[in-house]
Image (tube, rainbow, N blue to C red):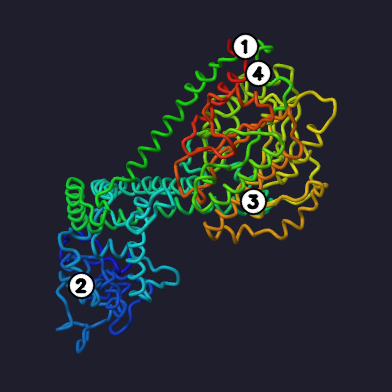
Amino acid sequence: MSHHTPPRQLPETDAASASPDGTPAEDASTAPAPNDPGPGAPADVEPADVEPADEETAGATGEANGPTTTAEADEPVAHPASARTADGPEDGKDGKGGKGEKAPNEAVVPRAASADEDSTDAAASGSTSAGSTSADEPGPSGGAAAAVRPGWFGWRRRFPRAARAVRVGTSVLAGVLLFGVLLIPNRLDRIAVDSFLRLPVEAIFLAAVLLVLPSRARRVTALVLGAFVGLSTVLKCLDMGFYQTLARPFDLVFDWVLLNDAADFLKDSLGRPGEVLVVIGVIVLLIAVLVMSALAMVRLADLMARHRPVAVRTTLVLGTAWIVCFTLGVQPGGVTIATKGYTQYLTNRVQYVREGLGDAEVFQKQLRVDAFAGTPSDRLLTGLRGKDMLFTFIESYGRVAIDDPAMAPEIDATLKAGDDRLKSAGFAARSGWLTSPVTGAGSWLAHTTFLSGLWIKNQQRYRTVTTSDRATLTSYFQKTGAWRTVGIVPGVRKSWPEGKYFGLDHIYDSTHLGYQGPYFSWTPVPDQFSLEAFQKLEHGKKDRDPIMAEIILASSHNPWSPIAHTIDWNDLGNGTVFNKIKEEGTNPTEVWKSAKRVRTEYRKAIQYSLDSVTQWVQRYGDDKTVLVVLGDHQPVPTVTGGTANRDVPVTIIAHDPKVLDRVADWGWTDGLKPAGNAPKWRMDQFRDRFMTAYGPAKK
């Protein structure tokens, strides 16, 4: 047994009984213990093995030559010699009796402990002795010493002030971290200083729960709650990204598949090594967030347990303050002090999940309703027989391009120039508004909504409808047998099995358009070249059947830098002419440093797409040509300013006046620009209205 710890009190024995070595008990009381140093000799335990009993007394303990005992000063011991002062005899005493002797039953406390007695007693007020201290509230000598570890190379003992600063600082950071997670909004545009000047009820509730739990349950609960808070932090970060791109939060039911699309985007942008590095970095960051949140919660739980009276009083005061502020609606400077925003956030997420899980059943019922399913093919789309029908989607062409004061003058000029081109070629146009199911991205969902007549708002609905027998606007053209149906989809760069669902006889993706020029950021093929390729591959052929084409124009796809510009159609060739145009273009990294520049480049991209369409109609259109030109969704919030509006322009262009007469009762605006008060429909309503307007004429 080390001389650090006094031996247990032995049962009383006969005073005349001898010690094991034959020494009488009376003599044994003054005989040196086996491990006791002789008079004037140093203790046999190095000071490096000793931990300070308390941070405040660490300096005094470090200067002492003897170790600090963990026994109470008045605890009786069996062998007083073993509790003798580690320094040896007191000054001026010989250590062999007289004034240097201690009574047999009198415990001798090391000097360091004696020197710290006052501070130790103060720290131990209200606690029990070392032998009966509970695990929840460790005593100042046993618990504090156990909580303080030497650290690497014993730095905590060597630098006690620094150790204390680190300890306090770490606790403060843990509190700031947890309060920040509870208070931070899940949208970047809502993060401000006043977002953090609030009192979250969840923090008070968590403190109360952790205070009433016993030691082991408290630590387990803190660990679980900390990890949960970390997960909610990750979810909030995902929400921030989705709001910035799609103007909506991350969907816990349907959006996981989009993470795979994001990985593909990284691969296309950074290559395979870059994709792997980013994915590894994200995984490491995720683990770090969970671990840090869990450790922060455990640290604060232990801190409250060590200072339970103060923690209880503080929790009661804050709880009372929250109730008062919430009841009275205290809002200094417009800032709501008492908040339950984190609880509301979690409640909304649970509601979204419940709705998502029930959405499949709702959609299945909608899927079975089709007003034209039983219509004979010879009575379908009779008003368009003999015409070439082109459904042309302009990527990210949203209402903001027409309504935003900063973009409106240039867009108005482009639309007016387009009207002039159409008029010079004998065409006319009428325009209105459609409301897209998505914004920022998700073009395929908008395309499918427009063509299927169903509200395709998530990936599950998209997969369900594209694996069903639900007819689309394009497949009804195919069903009549009166049109050859083709797809010009330059944004498709890999297998696209869903293409069969849309009723297309032939699909031209980015590898089948004959383009050998450069990518323009995300865009594989410039719009002008895509339309020229359609002319050469299908529309320009002689002695052909009427064509129904779905054409996707992708030059206005995010990030809009660099962008192409229109050139002489005779100079397009195989697309290599665009190499120089790309070199002269802008750098997306520089563009995206300024929201103003992003909006400017977006506007230019929309102008390029509109010019490409109207120039193609002017150059190649004839009396059989009919187009429906529309945007698929609004651009990202960086351009829209975070508006919730999801309207997109839609225009019908035709040379034959009878085609536009069929939709005269729609109330659409003449020309390419819809009026602000022009009719607005949900995008899924267009299919049935269109097929009704161009079906058998009403008697």
Which residue lies under the disc numbered 2? 29
Question: Mark 4 is on which residue type?
Answer: Leu
Disc 3: which residue: 275
Spatial CA distance of label 2 from label 4 is 116 Å
Q: Nearer the viewer, residue 376 or 666?
A: 666
Kindly report which numbered mark, 1 or 2, lies closer to the viewer in this rendering: 1
Q: Could you say whether the residue bearing mark 3 is in a helix, strand or loop? A: helix
Q: Nearer the viewer, mark 4 or mark 1?
A: 4
Instruction: Specify the amino acid type for callout 1.
Output: Thr
- Judged left or right of residue 279, residue 58 is left
Nearer the observer: mark 2 or 4; the answer is 4
Whether label 4 touches label 3, CB < 8 Å? no
Does residue 288 lie above or below 454 as drawn?
Answer: below
Name the residue nearer the viewer: 280 or 675.
Answer: 675
Q: Quickly name the residue at label 4.
A: 381
Which residue is labeled 1 in the image? 375
Label 2: how many Cα within 10 Å (few below 14, some 14–19, many 20+) = many
